[in-house]
Amino acid sequence: MRIALAAGDGIGPEIMAATLELFAAAGVSKLVEFVPVEMGEAIFARGNTRGMTDEAIRIVEDLGVLFKGPMATPTGGGGKSINVTARKMWSAYANYRHFRTLPGVVTPYSKAGINLDFAIVRENIEDTYGGIEHRLTNDVMVAKRIITAPGCDEVLRFAFETAKRMGIDTVHCSHKANIMKMTDGLFLERFRTMAAEYPGIAAPDVIVDALCMNLVMKPSQYKMVVLTNLQGDIVSDLAAGLVGGLGFAPSANIGRNISIFEAVHGTAPDIAGKGIANPTALVLSGLMMLRHIGLEKQAATLENALLVALEEGAHTGDFGDRSKPTLNTESFIKEIIARLGHEPKTVKPAPAGSSDRINYATPAKPETPLMMRTITDVKKEVAGMDVYVEAVHPAADTAVQMERLCASSPFHITLVSCRGMQVWPRGSAFTECVDYWRVRFELRDGRTATQADAITLLGHIAEHALVSEYELLRTFNGTRGWTLAQGQ
Ligand code: NAI
């Protein structure tokens, strides 16, 4: 089998070389050929804003599996994160991260005898990671948060199926649906719907802020938590902290066709080039990859050797028993290689698994991008529109102006809000405002309208006010497709 390989930037090449040396020692290179692809900082530097060559894209799409080191994201300028681009372009929708107490990695929990072993499944493509952001007025920036029913279903299906396969009896959904009623509300609703298909798995939910506290206070109550993208990103770094830091947090980005295996940590520019980085997270990510392609036995042998090395005190500078010598990346890997074939004594050895052969079919290239649909046969009716105008005069003045402008349209003005808080017709003098009003127009009694009617009114408004944004309000099978303003 061939696997695309991008060593990455910063510490990437050092930890990747060490990881491949270890894999070679366990005989993996006899079964897998790693095909180098050009991705990362050097490609950005050549003026390629994707950070990867066309040839790299072709190879990854042909092979279906990418093993990658961390890659730097250019700060400022227009360069987007190559990591996010790769996940999104290839629809690697589920980010699976496993956190566990490792021998030799001392944490407040290990000192208290608390053994941690849980997984976080993070939606990997949607949410604010579209990076769809705009400056709307002098003072206001917005980011779009996109949550879709098929996107929720893909990651939730992965979570439940993984839990079932691994014998995990509880999957928590974590969210902020109390505040983001439509976006996180959809994620929670899809979770509850899918949970009904898995009667053997308990499926409670927990609000994400409570989850953070619970993870710190009593982490062992969780076995698997599934979250939307940004919340999952933040919570999984918190989880990494519980088990000793980023050096021990592996991840798999799983998609229908293409999967990417990488450590959670970044390029660690502060220690790059010194040969002292901890390769454990990348090794653990590589083990996930070996299991993904069927090499379960090889993965178990490697994992056990790593556990024995850690148990016996092998450590790099970022962790471990200071009474034992600090190893550089290369010597740390040598310690693991020396223990191939050994089994740990203080922790349970990795399950051997049944397969030692490649069990992976490269993806067939779709002729056109897949169009996913989940909720169909919906009757939609135009009910109004929200128009966002840039203005600095009081809300009441905007309301009077807008009432005049919509006088001959099927719509009338029902509210003005600022930063989501109603300020007209009711409001508080204590509500601080900015130069960005949302004016809500709704159908007059007994009237119907089309999108064209809304746009006609919008065009009329645009002749008199500065429109910075517009959203159509529609009902879906009679249910409002928008939220009320606070205070409404
Ligand atoms: P970072 O994870 O690179 O470093 C944070 C801290 O952890 C540093 O003190 C670093 O020395 C330490 N650290 C990280 N990995 C280590 C390891 N294996 N061994 C020992 N110490 C380790 O995060 P930072 O500094 O915020 O990001 C640096 C760059 O990495 C940025 O350009 C960022 O965009 C990129 N990045 C890339 C990721 C990826 O490729 N998936 C993920 C996160 C960040």
Image (spheres, rainbow, N blue to C red):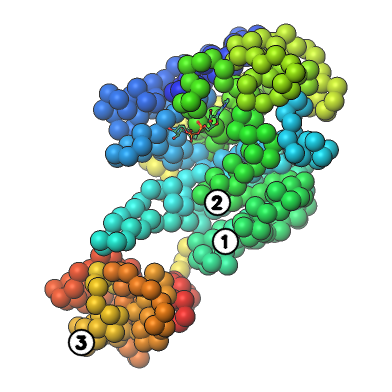
Left or right: residue 369 compared with residue 115: left
Q: Are marks 1 and 3 in contact (CB under 8 Å)?
A: no
Residue tagged by mark 1?
176
Q: CA distance from mark 1 to mark 2?
A: 9 Å
Q: Are marks 1 and 2 in contact (CB under 8 Å)?
A: yes
Residue tagged by mark 2?
231
Depth check: give the residue in front, 141 or 4.
141
Relative image position of residue 146 (x, y in whole percent): 44, 55
Above or below 8: residue 82: below
Q: Measuring 36% from the left and 84% from the top, which residue is drawn there?
A: 424
User: Amino acid type of disc 2?
Assistant: Gln
Left or right: residue 409 compared with residue 68: left
- The answer to whether residue 90 shows anywhere in this view is no
Left or right: residue 310 compared with residue 235: right
> Mark 3 near ligand 1 (CB under 8 Å)?
no
- The answer to whether residue 10 shows anywhere in this view is yes
Q: Are marks 2 and 3 in contact (CB under 8 Å)?
A: no
Q: CA distance from mark 2 to mark 3?
A: 43 Å
User: Amino acid type of disc 3?
Assistant: Arg
How many residues crowd mark 3 within 10 Å: few (<14), some (14–19), many (20+)?
few
> Mark 1 near ligand 1 (CB under 8 Å)?
no
Q: Residue furthest front?
A: 323
Above or below 428: residue 208: above
* Quadrant including the N terminus: top right
Q: Earlier in the sequence, mark 1 or mark 3?
A: 1
User: Amino acid type of disc 1?
Assistant: Lys
Relative image position of residue 466 (x, y in whole percent): 20, 69
Depth check: give the residue in front, 164 or 129.
129
Q: Which mark is residue 404?
A: 3
How many residues crowd mark 1 within 10 Å: few (<14), some (14–19), many (20+)?
many
Relative image position of residue 230 (x, y in whole percent): 51, 49
